Amino acid sequence: MTNLNKKLYWAPRILGVVFILFISLFAFDVFGNNYGFWKTTAAFLIHLAPVYVMFVVLYIAWRWELIGGFIYLFLAFYYIFTVNSSFLFKLPIAAPLILIGGLFIWDKYSKE
């Protein structure tokens, strides 16, 4: 495996983990609401639902790069077309998904 192939193999996987960490930061907004321990815990776990989905997508992409890459692209375009806000506000979520999906697909086709 050449140096470029190693980087191409690890780049989308590392970026996927970093993206999961980024998305998980949004779950911490529940701690300032004074709900009490159990309601805060439940709200925190519910706010982590996108993180659970991204773990599953990363697992799929890790095993099957092409399928996972297309799932990442699908999630990016789904987010772009369903969220009702300015395009600039969609970029911090959609752009990393497109990048990660593209890198997984590129990794798959670079092996052949």
Image (tube, helix red, strand yellow):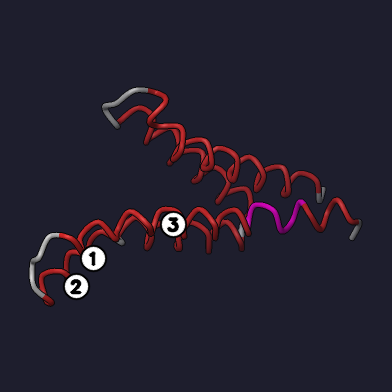
Whether label 3 touches label 2, CB < 8 Å = no
Judged from the image, the secondary structure of the residue bearing numbered disc 1 is helix
- Identify which residue, 84 or 103, lies in the foreground: 84
Q: What whole-number distance in Å separates the C-alpha atoms at marks 1 and 2?
A: 5 Å
Question: What residue span does the magenta drawing correspond to?
Answer: 8-13
Is residue 27 positioned above or below 105 on the image? below
> Most extreme residue toward the bottom, as rendered?
37
Q: Quadrant of residue 110?
A: top right
Is 106 displayed left or right of 30 in the figure?
right
**Mark 1 neighbour class, 10 Å CA radius: few under 14, some 14 to 19, many 20 or more:** some
Judged from the image, the secondary structure of the residue bearing numbered disc 2 is helix
Whether label 1 touches label 2, CB < 8 Å = yes
Q: Quadrant of residue 64?
A: bottom right
Read off the residue under disc 3: 54
Residue 44's spot in the image, x, y percent?
23, 65
Which residue does the image show at 43% across and 41% down from the upper left? 75
**Mark 2 neighbour class, 10 Å CA radius: few under 14, some 14 to 19, many 20 or more:** some
Judged from the image, the secondary structure of the residue bearing numbered disc 3 is helix
Which residue does the image show at 82% across and 48% down from the upper left? 112
Residue 80's spot in the image, x, y percent?
39, 30
Q: Quadrant of the N terminus?
A: bottom right
Read off the residue under disc 1: 44
Read off the residue under disc 2: 41
Whether label 3 touches label 1, CB < 8 Å = no
Q: What whole-number distance in Å separates the C-alpha atoms at marks 3 and 1?
A: 16 Å
- Identify which residue, 102 or 84, lies in the foreground: 84
Label 3 vs 1, first from the N-terminus: 1
Residue 95's spot in the image, x, y percent?
52, 36
- Identify which residue, 96 or 56, lies in the foreground: 96
Tag 1: residue type?
A: Phe
